[in-house]
């Protein structure tokens, strides 16, 4: 051990270069300020773009929720496969500085292409999809490629004797990551929703601002070029490990029964590789085997930006009348809670557990973290079940949905052959009763509806098509009661808007102008098309009829609701009567319920418990997991385990991709499935952890004491980047 220290000291003294400039008399190099600003801008760029990505797929590219979720997680997965490529390029070819610069250019190009694809006037939908996919691929290679380089490059700027300053730099670096994440997930949804361009939400601006931030990040990083220490490529241990594994497998496969037996299959590589390297690979493989169950945790964790965001679009985001949160802004809660929970767990929770004489090892913490994540999805399931109560489920095959508006002068009763639907009297001008399931017995059917108007009987024949929703509008004429069938829109707006239509009972047509939209409502019970309008109070809506102008008050049109406004009155006025299509019948958990209020009446605050549980799970899973793998790996293998850790994130996103596209479950059942799978995986992981024996990598020096000067030099270089590898992995402990 003493010989090793002497060798390190000798190398350090012989390798000293001119001192870098320091900040204000401290031991902090001036150049780290450029690196910290670069990281802040890059993280703002990445998280800001990703925050609005799911809603972009749904509202702009018009993909369904499953496809949007699948592509979102395919992108996330690619972002965590590409760090291996970035590490190989940096360590074996270009070095960290050039790798960061070149891949940042790729990163910027990806943002620019993505922003151009969000401009409606640029081509058709095929061009928009192509540009979006090319942009996302370039961004994935950019962000993933520089991920293993920036933190390590920052650590390289410190002299060997300034270990404390280097560790404090990592704390500042970590804070810049969180600051960029929090600010971007607040700001870019505002740019998307509050700024209107090209006739709708301004996704081009929401993607363009992160592109500008990435340009700033690149310019700032290059500005410090003259101050950086730029180490040449050192070679990548991953290549050595792969070659050693390949040789061991090859020799084992080609061996005969007459060859001497080996204790371990890796020992078949001893003819070419040193025993120390083989022993280190054995240690790493034992940890990598424990990594096998871990992707399931990330499969749940990363749904904060996809399924949980989509859940938020069907919830009430209003805090009073003055402030309405955006659904894609809820992701900031994870980053905020991380900043709160990390010190609380370190200073309060873990010490209290220690006072109870409970030995909470890193592996035990990880198992508890999995349970917290499963509980988070249990909470998400409960929220989803309640959100479903505000959603009108489409009718199954062979049926349609029907509701009735009675705009006649008196109460009426309906009779439908072979059915007892609407058997109770329907009052004049009352809000419609619940949607009823009308049996058709096929794709479509023409039905004669009987109408009893105080003993006067009338009939109307209407054709209904399966799986559609209809409103049957009844009104009086001199000949009696007549019918008019209107097709309804029962899907909630993914933009958290309200749907609105008008029925004009007057003898003159009415034009209604509001929220930048024009509704033309024909005379004599004409019905306007359904249109979506922004959630707000509409107290002065302009109407024109003939040569007259009117102003009507519609009050609050709430998110997720569907309204029908009856325009009444004579030639001198217009009197609006707002009806909310509020009543729905759904089959839920084997029982039938009738619920009122399909407006998004489940408040977004009910998502806070699931975010809190998930963040607690992250604190107990991610940070102890990184500490465990860091402590169990030899010094020159820490980067390899970091790559393995990032791959668990990538494979976790692959799991979500497969389930979203293949399972075909209701959302609450899918949440419950993920929770159950994680509990099962936690049990398997706990059994594996029980049989794991902790090791001390420092004992390798006693087992293999002889080292050459070159080997010691390699160790010194690896020791200088140990902390950077730790930080690069712990970055996963911010929100995704």
Image: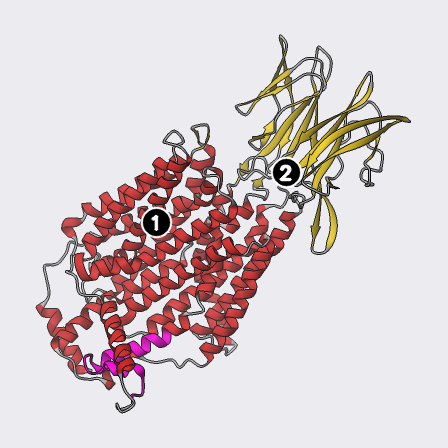
Left or right: residue 19 versus residue 260 is: left
The answer to whether residue 613 shows anywhere in this view is: yes
| Lateral position of residue 217 relative to residue 657, left or right | left
Quadrant in the picture for residue 447: top right
Q: Which residue is mark 2?
A: 490
Q: Which of the pair 21/726 is nearer the observer? A: 726
- Residue 577 appears in which quarter of the rendering? top right
Q: For the image shown, how many numbered marks are present on the structure?
A: 2
**Within the image, what quadrant is residue 421 found in?**
top right
- Give neighbour class at mark 1: few <14, some 14-19, many 20+ (Cα, 10 Å): many
Judging by the rendered image, the residue that carries numbered circle 1 is 43
Residue 239 drawn above or below residue 186: below
Mark 1 or 2: in front is: 2
Scheme by which the image is coloured: secondary structure
Label 1: element kind? helix
Picture coordinates of residue 251, whole percent (x, y): 25, 80
Local SS, label 2: loop
User: Left or right: 3 with respect to 615?
Assistant: left
- Note whether 604 is above or below 378 in the view shown: above
Q: Is residue 706 above or below residue 727?
A: below
Main secondary structure along the magenta-highlighted residues: helix
Looking at the rendering, the stretch of residues picked out in magenta corresponds to 262-287
**In which quadrant is the C terminus drawn?**
bottom left
Instruction: Give neighbour class at mark 2: few <14, some 14-19, many 20+ (Cα, 10 Å).
Output: many
Say whether residue 286 is magenta. yes
- x 36%, y 65%: residue: 645
Quadrant of the drawing holding the N terminus:
bottom left
Upstream in sequence: badge 1 or badge 2 = 1
Q: Does the residue at mark 1 contact the one at mark 2 (Cβ under 8 Å)?
A: no
């Amino acid at each position: 051990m003493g010989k090793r220290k002497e060798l390190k000291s000798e190398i350090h003294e012989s390798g000293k270069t001119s001192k870098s400039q320091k900040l204000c008399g401290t031991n902090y190099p001036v150049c780290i300020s450029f690196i910290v600003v670069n990281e802040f801008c890059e993280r703002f760029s990445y998280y800001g773009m990703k925050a609005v990505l799911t809603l972009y797929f749904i509202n702009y590219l018009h993909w369904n929720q499953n496809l949007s979720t699948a592509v979102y997680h395919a992108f996330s997965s690619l972002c965590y496969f590409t760090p291996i490529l970035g590490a190989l390029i940096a360590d074996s070819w270009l070095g960290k500085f050039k790798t960061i610069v070149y891949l940042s250019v790729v990163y910027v190009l990806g943002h620019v292409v993505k922003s151009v694809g969000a401009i409606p006037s640029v081509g058709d939908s095929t061009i928009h999809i192509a540009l979006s996919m090319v942009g996302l691929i370039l961004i994935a290679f950019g962000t993933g490629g520089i991920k293993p380089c920036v933190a390590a490059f920052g650590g390289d700027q410190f002299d060997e004797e300034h270990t404390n300053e280097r560790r404090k730099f990592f704390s500042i670096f970590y804070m810049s990551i969180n600051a960029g994440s929090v600010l971007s997930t607040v700001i870019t949804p505002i740019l998307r929703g509050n700024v209107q361009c090209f006739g709708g939400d301004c996704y081009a601006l929401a993607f363009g601002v992160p592109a500008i931030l990435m340009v700033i990040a690149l310019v700032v990083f290059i500005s410090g070029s003259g101050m950086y220490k730029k180490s040449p490529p050192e070679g990548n241990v991953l290549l050595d490990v792969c070659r050693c594994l390949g040789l061991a497998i090859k020799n084992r496969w080609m061996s005969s029964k007459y060859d001497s037996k080996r204790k371990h299959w890796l020992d078949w590589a001893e003819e070419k590789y040193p025993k120390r390297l083989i022993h280190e690979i054995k240690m790493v493989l034992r940890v990598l085997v424990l990594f096998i169950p871990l992707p399931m945790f990330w499969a749940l964790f990363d749904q904060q930006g996809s399924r949980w965001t989509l859940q938020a679009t069907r919830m009430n985001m209003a805090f009073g009348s003055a402030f309405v949160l955006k659904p894609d802004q809820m992701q900031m809660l994870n980053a905020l809670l991380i900043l709160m929970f990390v010190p609380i767990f370190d200073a309060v929770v873990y010490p209290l557990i220690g006072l109870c004489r409970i030995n909470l090892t890193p592996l035990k913490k990880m198992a508890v973290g999995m349970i917290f994540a499963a509980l988070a999805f249990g909470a998400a399931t409960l929220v989803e079940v309640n959100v479903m109560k505000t959603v009108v489920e489409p009718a199954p095959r062979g049926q349609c949905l029907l509701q009735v508006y009675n705009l006649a002068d008196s109460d009426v009763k309906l009779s439908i052959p072979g059915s007892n639907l609407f058997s109770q009297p329907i009052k004049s001008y009352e809000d419609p009763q619940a949607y009823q399931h009308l049996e058709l017995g096929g794709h479509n059917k023409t039905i004669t509806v009987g109408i009893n108007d105080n003993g006067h009987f009338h009939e109307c024949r209407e054709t209904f098509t399966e799986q559609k929703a209809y409103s049957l509008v009844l009104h009086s004429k001199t000949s009696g009661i007549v019918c008019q069938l209107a097709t309804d829109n029962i899907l909630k707006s993914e933009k958290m808007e309200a749907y609105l239509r008008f029925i004009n009972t007057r003898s003159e047509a009415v034009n209604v102008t509001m929220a930048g939209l024009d509704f033309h409502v024909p005379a004599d019970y004409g019905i306007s098309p359904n249109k979506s309008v922004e959630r707000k109070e509409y107290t002065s809506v302009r109407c024109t009829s003939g040569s007259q102008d009117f102003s009507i008050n519609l009050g609050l049109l709430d998110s997720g609701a569907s309204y029908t406004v009856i325009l009444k009155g004579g030639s001198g006025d217009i009197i609006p009567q707002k009806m909310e299509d509020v009543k729905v019948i759904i089959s839920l958990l084997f029982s039938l319920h009738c619920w009122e209020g399909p407006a998004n009446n489940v408040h977004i605050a009910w998502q806070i418990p699931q975010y809190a549980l998930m963040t607690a799970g992250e604190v107990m899973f991610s940070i102890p997991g990184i500490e465990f793998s860091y402590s169990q790996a030899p010094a020159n293998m820490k980067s390899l385990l970091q790559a393995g850790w990032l791959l668990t994130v990538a494979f976790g996103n692959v799991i979500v991709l497969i389930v979203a596209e293949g399972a075909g479950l209701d959302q609450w059942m899918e949440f419950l499935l993920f929770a159950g799978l994680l509990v099962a995986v936690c049990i398997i992981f706990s059994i594996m952890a029980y049989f794991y024996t902790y090791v001390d990598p420092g004992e390798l020096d006693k087992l293999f004491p002889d080292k050459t000067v070159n080997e010691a030099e390699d160790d010194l270089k690896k020791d200088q980047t140990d902390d950077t590898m730790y930080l690069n992995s712990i970055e996963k402990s911010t929100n995704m």
